[in-house]
Each structure stands twice: as structure tokens, then as C-alpha cells.
Amino acid sequence: MKTKVLLLALLLVQGLSYAQSEPKFFSLGLRAGANLSQFKGNDLSLNSSEGSFQLTDNSNRVWGATGGIFMRFGRTFFIQPEIMLSQKGGRFSVFEGTSGKAEKSFKMTNIDFPVMFGVKIARFLRINAGPVAAFNLGRDGDLEEAFEDYTNEKDFDDAFRRAALGYQAGIGLDFGKLNFDLRYEGNLTDVVKLQLSNPQAQAQFDRKMNLVQATLGFAF
């Protein structure tokens, strides 16, 4: 009798221990970290009575902050919608006539809505990927002024798309309530598309973005 009671107690303790260690089906948390972003496209060359103007992409990336909330539904297989405020930008090399080379940059502030689909492949390791919709809230930098001054274009506001569709993919590590994510983000649609009066140059200034994102999160 004592042996049966002892065995039953042992099974109960093991069951409670497993239940406590099993991941929750739903969790809500915060994520914050940094973006290292870059914009890519074709070089832009313009010639006018005022001289020549050439813009090329710069390989240097731009740092920006990111942060927001996430919700995770599922255990081994999961879906994770997020709302993130994110800074993204780019650098360009500008050649204006005989004045030489100048560096121009700009940074956008977006609100992003990623929806990640993932699977846990080990106790602490997961992989995830999914679409992201980005909405432009504002921007700053000196690239816009360079275009307006040289091309006499006054509708540069329309160059930055109000919304863009992209994707994210990466890996994550979970240690209790703490989690770490490393992701790559790319664009499926143009982020920048300048409508120049010169039809030969218009198609040359279309830009897509890519970035590497690292964040630290906490699940409640």
C-alpha cells in the first residue's frame, strides 16, 4: 500500500513539473532592439543646363531603433502577430557637377505589422518567417533637399510610399520569459519611387530596402 501511494505521489510530482515547464499556448510580450538597414536600386544620372547629377547607393548601413509588442499563439507550431515602431534608412553618394562627392542620408519612421509563422525545433530554438506591412509615419535627412535643389522637383513627398509590403525571416531563442530574435527583412514592393519629370530618369530611382534586425523580448 505504501509503495502504491509513493508511486502515485511521484507520478503526480512529475506531472506538475511537466505542466509548469510546458510552454503556454498564448503569450503577450514586448520586443525592443535595433535595425541595420540599407536601400538598393539603380544609379540615377541626370544632365541639364545646370550640369550633371549622379546618385549611387552607398554600402554603409544605417542604424535605427525598433520596439513594440507581440502575441504568440501555439506551442510547437505558432503564429506571432506584432506591432512595431521601427526606424529604417539609407545612405547615398551624390556627385554634382564638378563639386565632387557628397554623402547623403535619410531615415524613415514606420509602424510595422509583421505576422510570423514558426516552429520550435528544440527546447530553446525556433525558426519563423512571414509577411510584414510597413506604413510610413515620417522621415528626416538631407537626401530630399539635394534632389529638390538640383532637379527643381517639388513633389519629392510622393517619392516615399505610404505603405510597403515585405517579408521577415530568422531564428529565435527562448529562455523562460526572455527571448532573442535575429531576423532579415526585405521588400516585395518599392519603398521609394520618385516620379521625375524626365521620363528617362523616372524608372531609375526605384528603391527597395533590406535590413538585419536584432531584438530582446520579454513575455508576460
Image (spheres, rainbow, N blue to C red):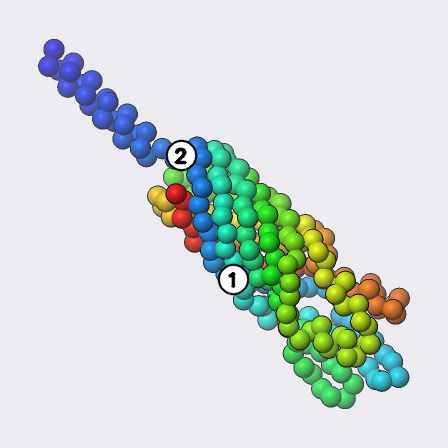
Q: For marks 1 and 2, give the CA distance.
A: 29 Å
Q: Residue furthest bottom?
A: 98
Circle 1: element type: strand
Residue at image mark 1: 65
- Snapshot quadrant of residue 177: top left
Q: Dot 2: within a 10 Å radius of its alpha carbon, few (fewer than 14), some, or many (20 or more) residues?
A: few
Q: Position of residue 166 (x, y in %)?
A: 65, 50
Q: Quadrant of the C terminus?
A: top left
Q: Position of residue 5 (x, y in %)?
A: 15, 16
Q: Quadrant of the N terminus?
A: top left
Q: Nearer the viewer, residue 55 or 109?
A: 109
Q: In the drawing, does residue 9 fall left or right of residue 42?
A: left
Vertical order, 133 against 195 (above or below): above
Q: Position of residue 9 (x, y in %)?
A: 19, 21
Q: In the drawing, does residue 90 fall left or right of residue 13?
A: right
Asked if the residues shown at circle 1 and circle 2 are in contact, with their CB atoms under 8 angstroms apart, the answer is no
Amino acid on which disc 2 is placed: Lys
- Snapshot quadrant of residue 184: bottom right
Residue at image mark 2: 24
Q: In the drawing, does residue 34 fall left or right of residue 44?
A: left
Amino acid on which disc 1 is placed: Ala
Q: Residue at x 78, y 85 (%)?
A: 97
Q: Nearer the viewer, residue 181 or 153?
A: 153
Residue 119 shows in the view: no
